[in-house]
Image: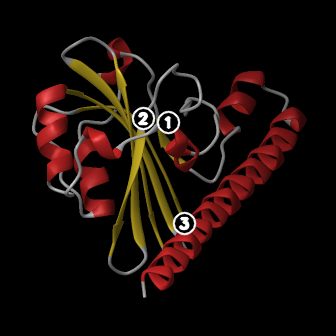
Amino acid sequence: MKNFYVVKSIFAKLFIVVSITSLLYACQADSSDAKQRAAASKNASTANASNTSSFSNSTSTDKSQAAQLPANTKSKFETATGLTLPDNAKVLFYESAEGSDQMVRVIVEMVASDFKAWIANYYLDTSHFSEEKRYLLGTNVSEWQPQTPKKLPTAQVQFENAKTLNIGYENQTLENLKIYLVFHSS
């Protein structure tokens, strides 16, 4: 019986990796098409503005730009995923893709104590995280850079109805963490 659950877990993880890879490939293909359209445009600034992927982007990579994200970005993530972030969490980056599957990627900053309490809701603690699982966050694309930090311990939560949440955390200071989240549902 134990072997059955191991095989089931392996197939579930393989399905998730294939699904995420397919989504990323589709986004890169859409981005290439957009670049070709942009090159044909006469106005360079208009061309740069039209160069988008299939993701709905609201992005920022540092604290000074985080204020530029729409005020409802956190609630947008919570509505899209059904998950609730800690009150003091600050969304630094947000993007989503929908089709037959849904994928939401977000980078959040929060204090370590809030993070530990938040992951406890999913029966996790930091001992469940490892560098070997970093692949679950995908590759570096645009402002999404999960492969760049020296250390990004990662874990996965599997929910009912083929939903998963991949979580990676990077220590910014002793108190502040930068959290990479990938939510995927089929």
Residue at screen point 55% across, 34% down: 144
Outermost residue, front side: 2
Residue at the (53%, 50%) spot, across then down: 136
> In the image, is 36 to the left or to the right of 145?
right
Q: Amino acid at mark 3?
A: Lys
The answer to whether the residues at label 1 and label 3 have Cβ atoms under 8 Å apart is: no
Pinpoint residue 77: horizontal percent, then vertical percent.
31, 51
Numbered circle sitting on residue 30: none
The quadrant holding residue 139 is: top right
Q: Amino acid at mark 2?
A: Pro
Q: In whole angstroms, how far apart are the C-alphas of marks 2 and 3?
A: 17 Å
For label 3, the SS is: helix
28 is higher (above) or lower (below) than 59: below
User: Is mark 2 in CB contact (under 8 Å) with mark 1?
Assistant: yes
Residue drawn at (10%, 38%), measured in percent from left and top?
A: 87
Res. 73 in view: no
Residue 129 in view (yes/no): yes
Q: Circle 2: is it few (<14), some (14-19), or many (20+) Cα within 10 Å?
A: some
User: Residue 101, image x and y in percent?
Assistant: 53, 71
Looking at the picture, does residue 161 appear above or below residue 92?
A: below
Residue under pointer 3 = 13
Kindly identify which residue carries mark 1.
Answer: 131
Mark nearer the N terminus (2 vs 1): 1
Classify residue 132 as left or right of residue 42. Answer: left
Tell me which label, 2 or 3, sits earlier in the chain: 3
Residue at mark 2: 153
At label 1, the amino acid type is: Glu
